[in-house]
Amino acid sequence: MFPTVRRSLLLQLDGKLPNLALMRLSAFLKQRGEAIEFRRISSPLMLEHGLFDEGWTSVYASLIFERTRPIAERLRQIYPGAIIGGTGWDRRTRLEQIGVTTQALDYSLYPDYPHSIGFSQRGCRLRCPFCVVPDKEGRVTEERAIEEIWRGDPYPRNVLLLDNDFLGAPQWRERVEELRALCANMTETPAPPAITDLSGGGEMRHHGRRFEAQWRFPHSRVGGPGAEGGRA
């Protein structure tokens, strides 16, 4: 008798970008030998049982926005044992709480996505009334170096940082140099990089393989007089 293969259904309930939590979860489950089915869901109707939907060992879902909760609630009705997480559902849930330990990301969930994506820092110094980051992630902490986020050759040297407060991390200058090095090491010769002094100018540009960041929080101080923190 052949052993039964565990089959898990992973559902992304909102968001246009790749979902890092589901990518980590998929990598973890595959390491355990499980078969993965991944779907992006945009309406409750897409959750209804299909011809081949029986026999899931586990169902997992992630949502970013609270406006997506009706879809998640319908999911619970259809799959009462579904494990749901994400800021839109519960800010306190963590993958580690269900045993996920790997930091590896399964990019195969998004085969057409060419970039590398991740956080170089977590948390934020500010407490904007509309933002959940300080409550969810707390104070600024270092997360990963740029070389740990980039997937490596043969993938493009395109790194999408999801950082909420890039200049709030003590190591932000190191991350900038890592970004410069990533661009400088391209096989195509770029134009000489040009980066303003972020502690004074609040702006960063790289011409050639371009990366650019702007900060627009004048009341934030990082690194010296005139520093501004904000959006990357």
Image: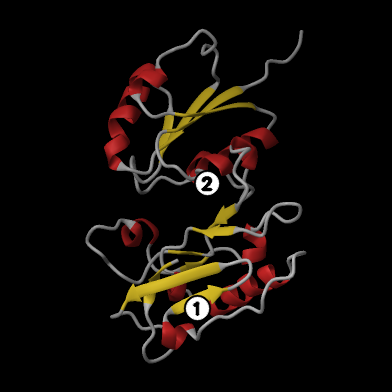
Amino acid type, residue under disc 2 in the picture = Leu
Q: In front: 11, or 206?
A: 206
Instruction: From this view, report whether residue 211 is shown above or below residue 34.
Output: below
Residue at (50% x, 69% y) in the render: 212
Element type where label 1 sits in the image: loop
Q: Residues within 10 Å of mark 2 (few under 14, many from 20)?
A: some
Image quadrant in which you'd find residue 192 = bottom right
Q: In which quarter of the image is residue 55?
A: top right
> Would you name the residue on which mark 1 appears?
170
| Quadrant assignment for the N terminus | top right
Q: How many numbered discs sit on the rendered protein?
A: 2
Which labelled disc corresponds to residue 107? none
Q: Name which residue lies at 56% across and 39% down.
A: 25
Quadrant of the image occupied by residue 173: bottom right
| Disc 1 from disc 2: Cα separation | 24 Å
Q: In this view, does 223 lie to the left or right of 57?
A: left
Q: Is residue 13 left or right of residue 208?
A: left
The residue that mark 2 highlights is 20
Q: Residue at x 57, y 75 (%)?
A: 176
* Quarter of the image where the C terminus is located: bottom left
Identified at 55% across, 56% down, the residue is 118
- Alpha-carbon neighbours of circle 1 within 10 Å: few (<14), some, or many (≥20)? some
Q: Where is residue 218 in the image (x, y as percent from the top left)?
A: 30, 80
